[in-house]
Every structure is written in structure tokens, then in C-alpha cells.
Image (cartoon, grey):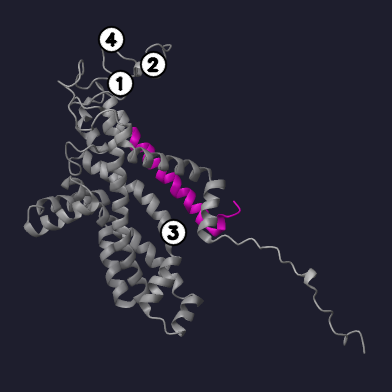
Amino acid sequence: MTTQDAPASPVKPADIDFSPRRKSRGFWSEALRDLVTRRRSGQVGLIIVLSMIAVALLAPTLATHPPNMVLIGKEEGVKRRQPPCIHAVDNLPSLPIVDFFRCEPGQPEHYFGTDGNARDLYSRVLFGARVSLKAGIYTVTLAILVGMVLGAVAGYVGSFTDNALMRILDVVLAFPSLILAIAINSALLTVADDSIFSRGLGVMQRVFGFEDIGLLTALISIAIVSIPTYARLVRSQVLSLKEQEFVTAARSIGARDSRILFRAILPNAMAPLIVAATLGIATAILDTAALSFLGLGAQPPTAEWGAMIGAERNQMFTSPHLIIFPALAIVVTVLGFNLLGDGLRDSLDPRMKNR
């Protein structure tokens, strides 16, 4: 018998590696790990966003006064549009930033000062984080839910349905988004007294937890003008994914179209949608602040950053703190979501793994 015909030697148990193998990380866990460990912009954005969420959740604990409490007659020495005052810096050396928060003799302590109605501005800015974050998250969630369905149906069905839906969305995109949001918001406020619409708005107020009807209509109007962005994004993903082999395999075993679309295609289209949603929250917060600044969003006495700036816009040079602190809150929050979105985009893109 030749060497080639010799039987192979049996495998001994000692030759088998029984050591536990490390489980490979999933796509999402790997992307999260990449975001936290390698993406500097994403790390900074995540810290800012988590900090703002913590401020919003802990606002009742961190605030020194109720946000809508008028302090005249309830606190000695308080005045309207009182400048910032922190007693802890009174004994520090003179520096521009220290002098900005230094107290006058007999002045009560208010970290950010008081507004034109003698309300504590620090407390109102903290509670404004709750309003702005809720508005941004709810707006994007509503826009994504509608846009995802429209884009998925258009991309998967194609033909006349695709053309009809896309042309309607193109018309919406033809208008400047903020101007269209103002028009829709004005129309919603006009019909808000109608019994049918008021009942529907009342249900949405309870669902979203907004007592301010102006803020709710602003949320709806911004969501409507944002729908085409998400719909077109989902449609492009569906068009590229529906020709993949796993979709063909699902069809070959008799899977229904609805199951293929919502169980196979859409989960694989979530990565760019999450990035767009993160960036969309920043845009929604800005648009909400803009509508409230113009008097079409949050109404007094709601503590919303844009409304706070709009109410005191004529005091920019005489009482700049009334503009500076709400504006800084908007800038920091929007910057945090933008940085987080950039980090997520890089972490979820396979081509950026080694960069």
C-alpha cells in the first residue's frame, strides 16, 4: 500500500481545541464601540447630548425656583431684568467673567438673573431643555414614522405609486421649509377652534404631554415639512436593497411583500436613517425656537428657549443676559446633536472603519 493510500491518522481528543471561542460582535454593538472609542466628534456630541438630557430630567431638582413664578412680592430686593448674581464669586479677583456674575449690594442671588416678569432665568433655561428636547425628538419621530412608510411603499411598489408620491413630496420640498412651516402652523392655529380638529389636537396634547397648543401645532408643522427628507432617504435605500439576494431568497420561499419590506428590507435601511434622525433633531430644535421667536410656537408662560429670546429681543444691549443664556443653550444642544450625528455617520459606514 502506497503512502497516498494510507488511512489518515485518527484525530485525538487532545488535538481538538475545546476553548470557548469569542463571540463576534454584532453590527450595532461594533458601531457603538467605534463611536465611543475612536470618534472624537461623536464622543463630544454624546457627552453634550447626555448632559442636556440629564439637565432636562433633573430640571425640577436643579432649578432654584418654579419656572413661571413671578418673584416680585415673594422675594425681597428682586427686580425685573436683574443681572446675573452668584454670591460665591463676590470675593474672587476682578476678571471679566467674574464681574459679569458679581452681585450688587443687597442683590438676591439668581445665577442667570431675572427676566422682564421677574422670573428666575436660570430655572426657565433648565425647564426649557425639557421643552426643546421633547419638541425635537417628537418632531423627528413623527416625521420618520410617516416618511418611512411613504418612502418604503414608493421604493418597493414602484411604477405609478412611486411617481405619484415622489412628485407630491417634490412639491413640498420646493418651498422653503421654515416659510412652509409658518404657513402650516398658521393654518392649524386657525382651525384649532373647530370641534373636530380641537378634539384631535386635544388627544395629541395628552399623548405628547404639551399643554401649549402653539407648541403642539409648531411640532406638527415642522414634522410635515420634514417628511420628504426621510421619505426620499428610505426610498433610495429600498431601491438598492430590494434587488439583493436575500430579498430574492425571501420571495422564492413565498414570503409576502409586506413581510419582506418591513422585516427584511427596512431593518437594513436603519443605519442612514438613524444618522439623519440625529441631525434632524438639531434642525427641529432650531425650527421650533424660530417659530417660538416669531410668536407662532410656544406661548407665554411656557419656558421655551426661542420664546424667551423673542420676548426680550429689544433688551439685547441693555440686558444682554436675557438673550445670551437661552441662545447658548440652543447652540450647545444643536452642536451636540450635530457632532453626535457626524460620529454616528462615520461609525455606521463600513468604508470609514479604518480611518
Horizontally, residue 252 falls left or right of residue 312, namely right
Give the SS element for disc 4: loop
Residue named by callout 4: 105
The first of marks 2 and 4 along the sequence is: 2
Give the SS element for disc 1: loop
Rendering coords of residue 19 (x, y %): 70, 63
Q: Are marks 2 and 3 in contact (CB under 8 Å)?
A: no
| Marks 1/3: CA–CA distance | 43 Å
Rendering coords of residue 291 (x, y %): 22, 43
- Name the front one of labels 4 and 3: 4
Horizontally, residue 348 falls left or right of residue 151, namely right
Q: Residue at x 45, y 59 (%)?
A: 271
Q: Looking at the picture, which amino acid does disc 1 mark?
A: Pro
Q: Residue at x 32, y 30 (%)?
A: 325
Horizontally, residue 136 falls left or right of residue 220, namely right
The one nearer the camera, 338 or 197, is 197
